[in-house]
Image (tube, coloured by chain):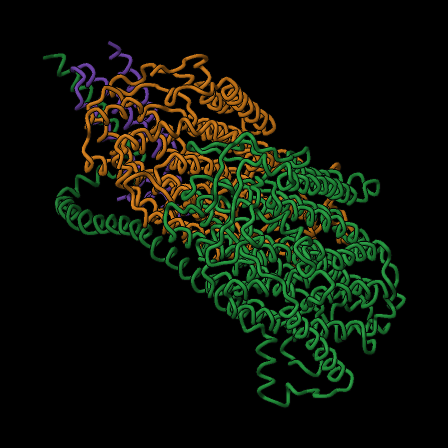
Chain colours: A orange, B purple, C green
Amino acid sequence: MTHLTDQNWLLTAGIFIPLAGAVVMMFIPGVEEQLHKTIALVASVLTLGVGVWTTAAYKYGQEPGTLQFYVNTSWIPVIKSRYILGMDGVGLPLYLLSMAIVVLVIIYSWNHIPAPGNPKAFLALILLLEVGMNGTFVAQDLILFFVFFEIVLLPMYFMIGVWGGENRQYASLKFFLFTLFGSAFMLLGFLGLFFKTGATTFGIQELASAVQTIGISKSTQTLIFAGMFLGFAIKVPMFPFHTWLPDAHTQAPTQGSVLLAAILLKLGTFGFIRIGIPILPLGAKAWAPVIAILAVIGIIYGALGCLAQTDMKRLIAFSSVAHMGYVMLGISTLTSFGLNAAMFGMVAHGLITGMLFFVAGSVKERYHTLEIKRLSGMLKQMPHLGWIMGFCAMASLGLPGLAGFWGEFPAILSAYQPAEGLSLALFRTCMVIAAVGTVLAAGYLLWLYQRTAFGEPSAEFAGATAGHDAHGGHDAHGDHGVAVVGDHDDHGSDIHDVELPEWLAWTPLLIGIVVLGVWPHVMFKVLDPAVGFALQGVKAIGG
Amino acid sequence: MLINEFLLLGAALFCIGVYGVLARRNGVMVLMSIELILNSVNINLLAFNLKHGGDVIGNVFALYVIAVAAAEVGVGLAIVLLIYRNRRSIALDELSQMKG
Amino acid sequence: MFLAAEGTGEVVLKSGWFLEHAYIIPVIPAIAFVLIMLFGKKLGWVVGHGSYFGIASMAASFVLSAGCVIQWIQRVNSATSGEGESALGRTISAVGRSLVPMAEGGETKAYISPVIKTFAWWQSGGTTFGIGSHADGLAIMLIFVVTLISTLVQIYSLEYVRGDRRFTHFFGALTLFSAGMLAMVLAENTIQLILGWEIMGLCSFMLIGHWWEERANSEAALKAFWTVRVGDIGLLVGVTMMYFGAKSFSIDAINEWALTNPTGTRVVFWTAMALLAAVIGKSGQFPLHTWLPDAMAGPTPVSSLLHSSTMVVAGVFLVARLYPVFWVGFSIADGGINPLVLIGGITILISGLLALVQVDIKKVLAYSTVGQLGYMIMGLGAGAWTPAVFHIFTHAFFKACLFLGAGSISHSASHHSFDMKKDMGGLWRKMPWTFATFLISTIALIGLPPFAGFFSKDEIIDNAGHNGYQAFMVIGLIGAFLTAAYMSRTMYLTFFGTARGASAGLHADPHDAHGAAPTMEPIEEYEADDAAHGHAHDTHGAHGGHDAHAGPHESPWLIVGPLVVLAFGAVFAGYLNAAPFGEKWLRFEKWAEPSAVGKTFPELSHAEFLWSKASISIGIVLAAVVIGLGLSKMVYERKFLFGLTRRNPVAGFVYRFLWNKYYLDWLYEKVIARGVAYPIARAAYWINQNVLDGVVNGAGKFSVGSGRWVYKWIDQRGVDGIVNGSGMTAKGAGSALRGTESGRIQQYASLLFGATAVAAIALVLYVQAK
């Protein structure tokens, strides 16, 4: 296989520009807050520019498995790990998503630095996080992958631990230890693989072909896959390893939640597609039923968890468990249809749930609470925010025409006919249960929406409405005849509609949700060949 | 052979680590400095492994150290957290219960 | 089954621009929706706050649909006209089995292929998903109806919701709904069908909850969405099964697969069962019908467009569209009983009984809609495809007209109340146009000739008997009786008798209708605890533009105009397929019924119209009208039998049972929904917090605990014990070194490092010396 090496500096640039930004910020005193914000923004926008360039230069119609912008230089010869980067259809959407989300998060941070402040450290951590995320999606060497995968942990640990809510210490430590625990097993799996194949590098594609030529037995593959499974499943998170997620989300600052939901969760599912399935087809097949069962348990269980919540942010966090269940169900079918659905589902979930966390953050900022019971009539007090939330809820529950549907329905569809050799009865049962999950999703999302957005504003906050049109240009929807209560001085003007930085940060996400929903082909055409390649091993072993 | 460069890097990291352990008041910083020290050891291990024929033993040691370090950080953070809970501070120079 | 004379290429079926470009029809309202949302408010009155976009788009779609209708008729004629006969690619001779063949006497019927346009939408795993249009008789009929009624309802809404606080959004949602419905009707494949289907669900949610400030409205909106969504599980599963059966999403391919049936009937049966769940949810059939009456919380134009004439027939349309799946899956040809016909039959009965006890005019009409949908489902289940589809067509006119009429009353006479007993009566003189149109539609609904309903409903009943579903023919007749009875009661309470409440010009508290809780004081007959059954008042939050009420009066022409057009349809629509006048009049059958027998459509049999049979049903209906009007007059005017339900325990029980809607709502809301939302969800969450998290926290605690244990027992007692022991001896020496024991870790560390450094230097020196 010949890889394309044109412009192969692009990926390295995409990974390390944020790092450069962070380093520059280190040398500037923390009091220059505006300067820090500018630097962070410039660095992230530059990175996104590189990402867009990469996408533009990406060549469609290559032979499956061809890596583009391929770099392969020596890195740590001692342990035979090489610096291999390469872009393919599986990595591209997430790579771009990660860059875009970071830009939006930094825009949002413009006037939303969470307590206790210190934008320098906060933004530098976000940039550092981006290094890890971007790197994970293009690394083609297991050790390199592992390094990037782990880099992500530390900034997130500090983001939650320092800028988090009341219970932040517990949440951040739980997050850190839980994921580290999984990573240890994952690393064991990698090492086992390396020694078993006797490969000369940790290159993913080389290992994949080595496994096939040597013919590692099914039991060994199953065992190695188990290690990787633990590492990835905790990151996803799959039932029953999900308990770190609600805590981390609830305690994390808004930006942290958005990054966590939009990108970090995808590292796990991405790992299955990039590493688990192509390298260990037999192992994947042995584990597929387990994954499918855990996935549908996650779907139903996450939905039930949502219904029991009283806190808006925690509810959204639990909904992630359910949504990632669909993604994992798609993966477990080991068909290109299912994997495509899973990849689409990841991006869609990133956009939609990221957006929901943004909304939750803004609600918290305005009402200083996320207790569902205490919120009411948001549509009346903040029509734009209410509409955006309704839109996201609809997207999240899988309305066709919006992005969520194309992750959810094809995943259900694929479960009807999983790869050869997998139990039809089991997967079809899973399919029906997953379909039931869509009703529950509608249940908790609309229930949340009804209680928070519909109705009259609760008495507690009724007087706090400031002018709707604080920012010119956007006239408030649906407030004809609504008496504008409250005077226009600072007194109690906390509750106001969407502000400019919020609009700037959110509009791209909202547009993305619609575009992907109306024109899913933009993603499927990137994904399809790459996913087909990832499944070559599975196809080769047949039933 | 780049052996000297490796050892110098290791020594530099070690010194930074020692400085951190001795000079920082913040418990988390001390823990991170200890990480640095451990990693400098790793570099040395790898460097010498390279020198002695490049077989796998040194690598295994290094990986072992990484794993131990991970565990150590975990336990260390837990301890720091407990200290913080009890004392509302993680400034190490205020800790003198071990005074005999 | 058919004498296939294959010869592709020589088919000279007429097509035309409109048919080829039918996909434009849903696109127009979709664009209009975007325009309304973006510019409706900004441009203000210039575009009627967005409403003109909506009306213009619907009118444009209507023109295109009309073009499609004309060209489709030309297409059918081109195939069946003399010269077309020889040019046919495929002639199909329908030789009957046990059944009488269609178009009596085994005459040949030409195969008229649908006009299909597909664009590739996306690709995944080797499958191409298309989007496009599938224009055939069924689809063309329905897009004509949808665009016509949408246009009329939007014109009506100009007046009806004038000055509403969310006027622009109202039109936006209505227009989006039309786009979704049209996309679904023209769906070329099942994915597009789901797309349109769910968009309609969303619009239904938005429009029912249009006045979401009130809890009752948002509850109704949620209930509608959830209930339909429960059925949609079946749609997702069914579409999946069909995809893997037919290896395609295309409607034609699926129908072909079901008929040729290579995978065995069992798969088809379960597919049909799954789809049936979707039909039950969307078309308000038993046992998921409960959302439809509640959906009346929405503004009346919404009830008229979505919840009577168009959206709720989507389920019926699904059955008609994928008829071979149901035909084969449920072995409809065998007669007797099958799930489809059973559901339809039950629905007819229960809805008819419920409609009898309603006091809210919109709820009567809602149950009536449920019942009429039941007729359609029953008809389809009994193999009466053409009458059932024809009933979609005629029902749309008169039911939309009835709802708009009810809206007209509430708008101009009863001060936004829909309570027939409290706020209506004697209106026929005050609102002649509304009365006339309402009356015509009522007669059409109860199925008296010569109005539209007779020609469709009677045919359904007749064909059910003809196809071996005698029991359901009887149910159909009972249903006709009930329909006539409750509609007579409604007519009486609304237009005759003495004027009451708002209709009499009384509204002591003119704003009570705007209050959050509907002020319904229990009248004699019902129990006080029924207050929970709030009656839908069209409470326009801030309707400033409304003229002050000067007693009941006729509505303005923007409202009356659509009524007249629809009433016109209610009178004449039936003549498109007037079986009593002979075969020549069966135009609808000729145009709409697919002729692809054996390929993508089963072979149907049609009952022969006999006046002797029809007179039975006409007699039943007339009897019901007399009984209904008479009893109403006696009960409500003469107070005859008044209070019976309180005096007689049996009557009281029946009444309570009906009033509580067979306790189905109680079952769904209190038992199922609450069961899931509270105990089950809480239990799951408890497990999460205590079991799963307990493991994690337990592991953490165990580590910390074992650390403590090691520290306490081994380190402190064991090691330290030794140390302490030896320490005692060293105490003297120790005290000298006490200064170094500051207890500060870093000091210890620096000592440690220092010592190590010294040792290292010593080592290096030693090695070098060697």
Which picture quadrant has residue C56? top right
Residue visible at 56% across and 67% down in the picture: C347
Compared to residue C588, the image places residue A253 above or below, namely above
Estimate the x, y position of residue A92 in percent, counting from the top left: 46, 26
The answer to whether one can see residue A338 in this image is: yes
- So how many labels did they put on this image? 0
Q: Is residue A523 above or below residue B44?
A: below
Within the image, what quadrant is residue C195 found in? top right
In the displayed image of the protein, which residue is found farthest to the right? C550
User: Residue C529 versus residue A504: which sits nearer the camera?
Assistant: C529
Report the side of C470 relative to C48 (left or right). left
Viewer-proximal residue among A78 and A160: A78
Residue, far top? B1
Q: Position of residue C703 (x, y in %)?
A: 27, 48
Residue A163 in percent (x, y) is at 50, 41
Look at the picture and state if A13 lies above or below B78: above
Tell me what residue is drawn at x 41 percent, y 54 percent: C270
Camera-nearest residue between C138 and C422: C138
Q: Quadrant of the N terminus of chain B?
A: top left
A20, above or below C282, in the image: above
Residue at the image point whose x is 29% and y is 30% from the top:
A537
The reply to whether residue B89 is in sight is no
Please tell me which residue lies in front, C350 or C548.
C350
**Where does the C terminus of chain B fall, quadrant-wise?**
top left
Q: Is residue C331 left or right of residue A226?
A: right
Quarter of the rendering containing residue C542: bottom right
In percent of width and height, residue A159 lies at: 47, 38
Looking at this view, name the residue that lies furthest to the bottom. C647
